[in-house]
Image (cartoon, coloured by chain):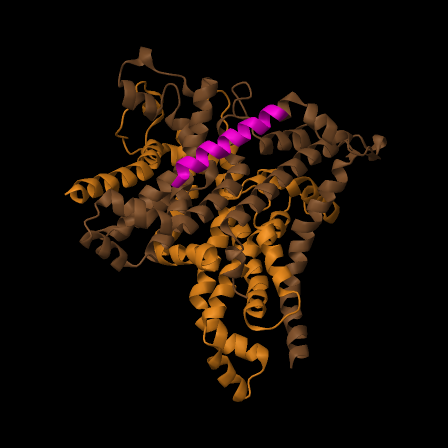
Chain colours: A brown, B orange
Amino acid sequence: MARTDAVAGWTMVAPACLVILLFALYPVVDSLWLSLHRSLVGVPELGTVFIGLDNYVALVRDPVARRAALVTLAFVGCSTLLELSGGLIIALVIHERFRGRGVVRAAILIPWAIPTVVASQLWRYVFNDQYGLANLLLYGDRIADYIPWLASPVVAFGIVVLADVWKTSSFAALLILAGLQVIPDDLYDAARVDGAGMWQRFRHITLPLLKPALLLALLFRTMDAFRVFDLVFVMTQGGPGDATQVLQFYGYQTLFAEGRLGYGSAVSVAVFLLILLLSLIYLRAIGSRLLERRPS
Amino acid sequence: MTRRLLLPLGIMGTVGLSLLPFLWFMLSSFKSQREIEAVPPGWCPSGSLEFYRSALFSHHLLDYVGNSVVVAGSTTAVALLLAIPAAYALARLTIPGKQGILALLLCVSMFPQMAIAGPVWRLLDALGGLNHRWGVVLPYVALTLPLAVWILASFFAELPAELEDAARIDGCGRWTTLLRVTLPLAAPGIFTAAILILIYAWNEFFFALLILTQPEQQTLPVGIALFQGEFTMPWGELAAASVIATLPLIAVVLMCQRWIVSGLSAGAVKG
């Protein structure tokens, strides 16, 4: 019985595993292999030459890559922090009972449903220097005061963060809401009887019990923020200067615009290792709970 | 007392911030060229459909919509076809190496696209999949499988095994049991997984940009990202195209809100 189970099980799992192996795992190995070679697209006569760790040495010395790493870290830090706070506020609001809660829940899901590319164009339009909503709301018809938002490095970075926060806070909110829903009501009742105010109840009951959900939202959002690409591609193309040049965009440029397969792969592997390292740290923080609670 | 003040503020703030920017974009799609170029811009559009007409007929919008439908539809179908048996086996059967498979799935769901972009491109180049819609379906399936398997497996695990045992005793084989008993019971989970895959495939940009280079094969996100005019940015047409790309999705999300919320929290928190 156990044997037929194993055979049947593997037959059912194998097709899915095969696709994942071919289009997700093998590519990672191939990236690793490529990153140890010098290889240029469109110059086949140069071939693919094994150069060991030279690409990585070059990567560490590359000022553009170093800068992109800093911008990426700043982006991940700012956007996850704001998304978690935003998500927490939204979750607290939609956890309350009020008339029309269904409509409000649906409304906050809309930014999440909008394709990132559309959201990017949308925010580019909102911060347009002439036709934009931002200038209209701030300055009305005082056209002389209109600000070319996306032309300033710091502001452009802030706007990309804002667009990301707008787009994804509701996802964080859903994860946090699931955490809120498992907190038993009698805890609050007991605290109320003991005379705890709203802030105290939030601080001593909600926050500690919400920690697993918050950590999980943090994990998911960090991974995603590291992968930011669409926003930068559409809104700023990495500019102005290199204010919004993130690693994923730099990797894309070296790989596909410049065709440096080897070096671009080294950038990809670096991004991959960074994410792997971070997820290991997070998984330690959340404990192995995440894996244990999965179906087993 | 504070609650009475804070809650309406919170509701208004959340809903306002969520909807206002998109509402403004949508209003712009109904403006006329003169209204789009007005500085300062006005709020109320004259209700002109000029931009919809030119977006649909002078850009490749109809191609993009068709391609997105084909790509998202086939991704969902193929991913479900692969994920359902895999999830069932992981939830129900004793397979050697199960923990390994689960860990592998979790790993893949964390992959940055960049880490696999170059090799996926080379692989598709070798297979002849560049510039074909099936060329993006394959990586989409690989990348959506982990989430689909997690959601479905947690759904299967919650179904009472007694029903299946009863069917087995009545003489159903494993596959008949799966098809006749388990699948209908798991329909809500399958539906949730389908919506999430569909949304992913409809919105994905990175691989579509790399793999589909001709407007005739490109999907909506690529079309909208590369939207360009001859001299100035055609904001009106872009807004119209964006509304067309977004409305079906908003409709799906609004209709299936309940499943999406339960699916996301099942896949992520409860597991």
Q: Position of residue A223 (x, y in %)?
A: 53, 42
Compared to residue B25, the image places residue B265 above or below, namely below
Locate the N terminus of chain A and report the quarter of the image it occupies.
bottom right
Q: Residue furthest bottom?
A: B170
Q: Is residue B132 left or right of residue A296?
A: right
Compared to residue B174, the image places residue B6 above or below, namely above
Name which residue lies at 59% across and 29% down. A69
From where the camera sits, is residue B139 visible? yes
Name which residue lies at 26% across and 47% down. A201
From where the camera sits, is residue A260 visible? no
Q: Position of residue A75 (x, y in %)?
A: 49, 31
Foreground of the two, A172 or B259: A172
| Secondary structure, magenta segment, majority class | helix
Compared to residue A125, the image places residue B221 above or below, namely below
Name which residue lies at 80% across and 30% down. A43
Compared to residue B165, the image places residue A43 above or below, namely above
Q: Residue furthest top?
A: A144
- Residue A254, located in which quarter of the rendered image? top right
Q: Is residue A122 left or right of residue B68?
A: left
What stretch of residues is rendered in magenta?
A66-84
